[in-house]
Amino acid sequence: MGDNMEKYTKHYVEIFCNTGAIRCEEIAERDPFLIKNDGFIHGFRFFDISYIEDDGLLYKSKEHSYSKNVYFGDRCSFEELTKRHRALFVDDYDKRPSASYCWFHNGSFIKLEDGDITYDELIESIDKIYKR
């Protein structure tokens, strides 16, 4: 390593759009209150990438997830999902009682994976921490 080595970390937000597109943006701070649901966003997550600049060469780390996936929708069970969405092909979905889905206000949905949360659940956990 040379004499001109610099190490730094940048913060990013990965935004999941309702069109299926994903976009990443560099951000100054990881603040979920700055992510606004414009009707086209299904969710987001924060991640970091570390960089080393050494004598004109740039090295970067893999993404390091800083947050869970956070979705702008309502958590529901498979049973609740079938009540909201009558045209489901039932054999294609996880029907276990422990399975959770996120129902979006545009009528679409996704299966929540372990650790995924809704925006309302995130706000509730922040409120508990700070006793708002």
Image (tube, rainbow, N blue to C red):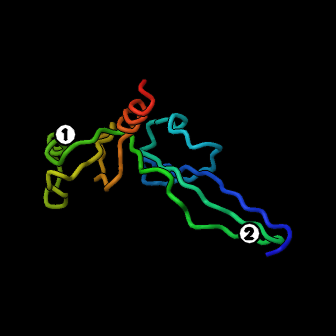
- Residue sitting farthest toward the right: 3
Q: Nearer the viewer, residue 23 or 130?
A: 130
Alpha carbon distance from label 1 to label 2: 50 Å
Q: Quadrant of the C terminus?
A: top left
- The residue under the point 14% across, 40% down is 83
Residue 81: x and y, percent? 19, 44
Tell me the SS state at disc 1.
helix
Q: Nearer the viewer, residue 79 or 123?
A: 123
- The residue under the point 38% across, 36% down is 125
Q: Nearer the viewer, residue 80 or 97?
A: 97
Location of mark 1 (residue): 84
Sooner in the amino-acid sequence: mark 1 or mark 2: 2
Is residue 39 left or right of 46 when viewed as pictured? left
What's the mark number on residue 6?
none
Location of mark 2 (residue): 58
Q: Quadrant of the N terminus?
A: bottom right
Residue 80 image-quadrant placement: top left
Q: Is residue 77 above or below residue 127?
A: below
Tell me the SS state at disc 2.
strand
Q: Using a 10 Å C-alpha cutoff, classify the residue at mark 1 as few (fewer than 14 neighbours), some (14 to 19) or many (20 or more).
A: few
Amino acid type for the residue under numbered disc 1: Arg
Amino acid type for the residue under numbered disc 2: Leu
Residue 52: x and y, percent? 72, 66
Residue 130: x and y, percent? 45, 29
Q: Using a 10 Å C-alpha cutoff, classify the residue at mark 2 as few (fewer than 14 neighbours), some (14 to 19) or many (20 or more).
A: few
Q: How many marks?
A: 2
